[in-house]
Image: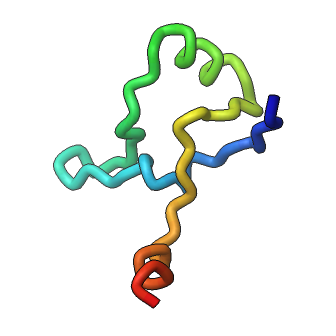
Amino acid sequence: MKAMKKTACESCANYVYDAESDCMYCEIDLDEDEMQRFLSSQTYNCPYYDFYDEYKIVRKQN
């Protein structure tokens, strides 16, 4: 099994800004077990983590 790295929500593509509520939130709906692990651990390894890279599309074009 591949070891997962500790994830940081701030660098995830699923962590987005909501102008209406003026806050950041995760677009992924965690199930009850995943949310429990997230809330109870400082080193939660999110299976939905997708590093936000604004230059990713540019690299694909070249």
Judged from this view, the residue extending furthest toward the left is: 20
In the figure, 24 relative to 11: above or below? above
Point out residue 28 in the picture as x, y percentages from the top left corner.
40, 33
In the image, residue 23 above or below residue 28: below
Q: Is residue 55 left or right of residue 24?
A: right
Which residue is located at x 61 percent, y 24 percent? 38
Residue at coordinates 22% horizontally, 55% vertically from top-left?
19
Is residue 17 positioned above or below 55 on the image? above
Q: Is residue 1 left or right of residue 34?
A: right
Q: Position of residue 6 (x, y in %)?
A: 75, 42
Residue at the image point whose x is 26% and y is 50% from the top = 18
Q: How many marks?
A: 0
- Whole-percent x, y for residue 2 in the image: 80, 35
Seen at 57% across and 57% down, the residue is: 51
Structure colour scheme: rainbow
Which of the 4 image quadrants contains residue 10?
bottom right
Horizontal side of 28 relative to 43 (left or right) equals left
Q: The N terminus is located in which quarter?
A: top right
Q: What is the x, y in percent for residue 3?
A: 82, 36
Residue farthest toward the top in the current orientation of the protein:
32
In the rendered view, tell whether residue 18 sits above or below residue 6: below
Q: Residue furthest bottom?
A: 62
**Along the line of sight, the residue nearer the viewer: 17 or 54:** 54
